[in-house]
Amino acid sequence: MSGGDFERIIDALSKADRVAVLTGAGVSAESGIPTFRGAGGLWEGHAIEDVATPEAFARDPSLVWDFYSARRQAALASSPNAAHRALAEMETRFLEFHLATQNVDGLHGRAGSRRVAELHGSLERVRCAGCGSARDWTDDLAFGRPRCGCGGLFRPAIVWFGEALPAEVWREAERAARTADVYLVVGTSGEVYPAAGLAIAAAREGAAVFEINPEATSLARFFSGALREPAARALPRLFTVLASRLPETDARSSDKE
Ligand code: BV8
Ligand code: ZN
């Protein structure tokens, strides 16, 4: 990591009114949740692209349920880390702050982020593959092939490959990317679209885009700079310096009253 980029990010954030963030699996790595495309990214020999599809569910619903039940247990057993907490703190420091995540683990919400755009759904809910009705994913849902009252199979409320992202959530994330002064891309390989396209849209519309990731990704050429260190180290460091320069927006607005 170059000290120059740290200063440039701080400088850009200090001047920004509108900040938007895209997170991926790397932000939860330090909570003990494995990423998808690095070492350890396979589940019992299956790549994510083989189990996270409607075709996989049609072929073998029990396999897909086992995969997501294991993921849900891992998420419930883990805790938000310092990166999630720093992002929750940042929410109060800008006139506009938008957090979009590709993660389904719920850790941003548990860290205290009030508004989280969950682009790929959540392990906290299921919906019926037949009638579409949704409900919370609770422990009493039988493993294997849980069924809805209508006779249809329940499925995790997750956006699988080949499926559209939730329209309203997507519209808002795209708007935030296009209007951001600063866009932070944290812990994502940027391989999955349309989510990765948010960072490119932000850069094209003039945002300063910074990547926080120990590894450079294929999106790096769109970025103004990077912090090549783990998110749970980089974000609290950024926030500590930033907090000394920016008042809380709640405080700003009460000053005006
Ligand atoms: C759609 C489910 C159309 C949730 C997921 C060919 C070219 C381009 C696109 C396509 C193509 N073929 C098909 C497509 C489209 C496809 C796609 O993008 N495929 C790619 C893979 C080629 N996209 C879709 O199908 C999307 N839908 O296009 O719909 C449509 C339109 C209208 C109507 C109908 C249909 C849907 C995509 C949603 C897929 N769902 N998951 C789940 O089970 O969790 S995607 C999956 O990847 C993950 O869940 C995650 O959400 C997503 C992104 O992964 P990352 O989060 O980036 O994780 P990864 O492991 O890759 O990277 C981790 C990073 O962290 C690394 O860079 C690492 O260095 C870093 N890191 C590690 N430790 C740390 C760290 N960083 C910071 N700190 C650390 N400590
Ligand atoms: Zn139903």
Image (cartoon, grey):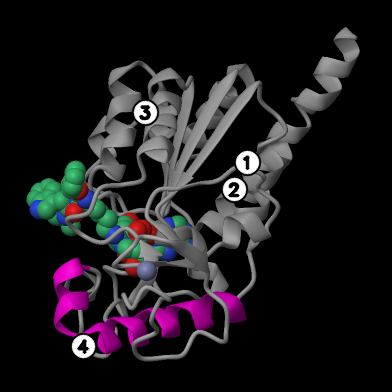
> SS for tag 2?
helix
Q: Which residue is mark 4?
A: 45
For the C terminus, give its image quadrant. top right
Task: Specify whether residue 247 is in view.
Answer: no
| Amino acid type shown at disc 2 | Leu
Give the residue at x 49% y 77%.
Answer: 72
Disc 1 and disc 2 in contact, CB within 8 angstroms: yes
Extent of the magenta region: 53-77
The answer to whether residue 80 is visible is yes
Residue 209 spot, x, y in % from top left: 40, 30
- Mark 3 or 2 closer to N-term? 3
Q: Mark 1 and mark 4: span between their CA atoms?
A: 38 Å
Is residue 163 toward the left or the right of residue 212 in the image? left
Q: Position of residue 121 (x, y in %)?
A: 42, 57
Residue holding disc 1: 238
**Circles 1 and 3: CB atoms closer than 8 Å:** no
Mark 4 secondary-structure assignment: loop
Dot placed on the residue nearer the N-terminal end, 1 or 4: 4
Q: Residue furthest top?
A: 256
Position above or below: 174 against 139: above
Magenta stretch holds residue 253: no
Q: Which residue is mark 3?
A: 224
Q: CA distance from mark 4 to mark 2?
A: 33 Å
Residue depth check, mark 4 versus mark 2: number of the one nearer the observer = 4
How far across and how far down the image is residue 71, in percent?
Answer: 43, 78
The amino acid on which the numbered mark 4 sits, given as a three-letter code, is Gly
Judge depth for marks 1 and 4 and give the one in front.
4
Q: Is residue 163 above or below residue 137?
A: above
